[in-house]
Image (tube, grey):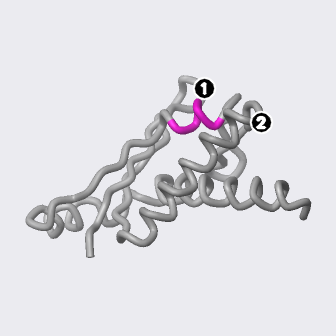
Amino acid sequence: MKNYYVRFDDDWADEMDVGGICIIEESKYNEFKDAIEFLEKYEKENGNIAVFMAFGTNEDNDYDSFKDFLVCFEYDEIPENELEIAKKYVWDSGRTAYYGMTNVIDIADDCKRLMRGIE
């Protein structure tokens, strides 16, 4: 099974960096990529999707579109021979990246429900 990294990088009000890296297995990566493809198409056909990314106890970043949110992400496969090294150094920095990735998946699910007429 392949493994991938997802990196989230943004800043909050020019006051602090918000980011992290997580390592995910291929099945979660495929779910993430499918959600991205769906939301890019959905936004193109229906207009911008406003997105917010919460972090901390009461902070969040607001994005005018999914496209604006997506530029905060970088993702790619981790070569098998580099996986153990990546796990050694990335193990605990990924909460923000993982939350951002699952946020993408949740937004896609919400849009699919709206398309089916279920709120």
Residue indicated by mark 2: 46
Q: Which label is found at residue 13?
A: 1
Residue sitting farthest toward the left: 81
Magenta stretch, main secondary structure class: helix
- Viewer-side residue, 53 vs 55: 53
Residue at image location 22% in from the left, 60% down from the top: 89
Q: CA distance from mark 1 to mark 2?
A: 29 Å
- Viewer-side residue, 95 vs 81: 81
Tell me the mark number nearer the camera, choosing from 1 and 2.
Answer: 2
Relative horizontal placement of residue 116, taking residue 26 as reference (left or right): right
Residue 14 screen position, x and y as percent = 54, 23
Q: Is residue 16 magenta?
A: no
Query: How busy is the neighbourhood of tag 1: few (under 14 within 10 Å), some, or many (20 plus)?
Result: few
Q: Which label is found at residue 118?
A: none
* Figure disc tally: 2
Residue at image location 41% in from the left, 50% down from the top: 20
